Image: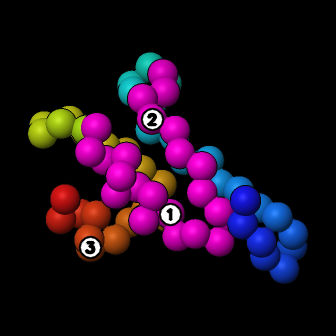
Amino acid sequence: MGRSRGGLTTKIHALVDANGNAIALKLTEGQAHDGTSARDMLDTIGAGQILLADRAYDSDALRGL
């Protein structure tokens, strides 16, 4: 759990397949940047697979992976 001005916060990051089945789940502090947690989860995606992500995960570093 992370601490912010609003209290204790947590984020749940989920990587799912086309049917919505969970492939990977990750918990982070609420104040943690989304891009840092995405790096670990993207290791499960193979070459040629399509990724659709929220814009909070958009960064040049992630696009280069």
Mark 2 is on which residue type? Ala
> Which residue is at a point 77% across and 72% down the rendered structure image?
3
Give x and y (percent) for residue 34: 50, 63
Q: Residue at x 84, y 80 (%)?
A: 5
The stretch in magenta equals 21-44
Q: Quadrant of the C terminus?
A: bottom left
Residue at the bottom extreme of this rendering:
5
Q: Label 1 belongs to which residue?
A: 34
Secondary structure found at label 1: helix
Mark 1 / mark 3, whichever is N-terminal: 1
Picture coordinates of residue 42 (x, y %)?
31, 47
Residue 15 lies in quadrant: top left
59 with respect to 2 (left or right): left
Q: Is residue 49 above or below residue 55?
A: above
- Which residue is painted at 18% across and 36% down in the image? 46
Compute the Cα span from label 1 to label 2.
15 Å
Labels in figure, total: 3
- Earlier in the chain: of badge 2 and badge 3, it is 2
Name the image quarter holding residue 38. Answer: bottom left
Q: Position of residue 8 (x, y in %)?
A: 82, 64
| Badge 1 vs badge 2, beta-carbon distance below 8 Å | no
Mark found first going from the N terminus, 1 or 2: 2
- In reply to whether residue 41 is colored magenta, the answer given is yes
The quarter in which the N terminus is drawn is: bottom right
Whether label 1 touches label 3, CB < 8 Å:
no
Question: Pointer 2: what residue?
Answer: 24
Amino acid at dot 3? Asp
Q: Is the residue marked by circle 1 packed among few (<14), some (14-19), or many (20+) residues within 10 Å?
A: some
Which residue appears farthest toward the left when viewing the image? 47
**Residue wearing tag 3:** 60
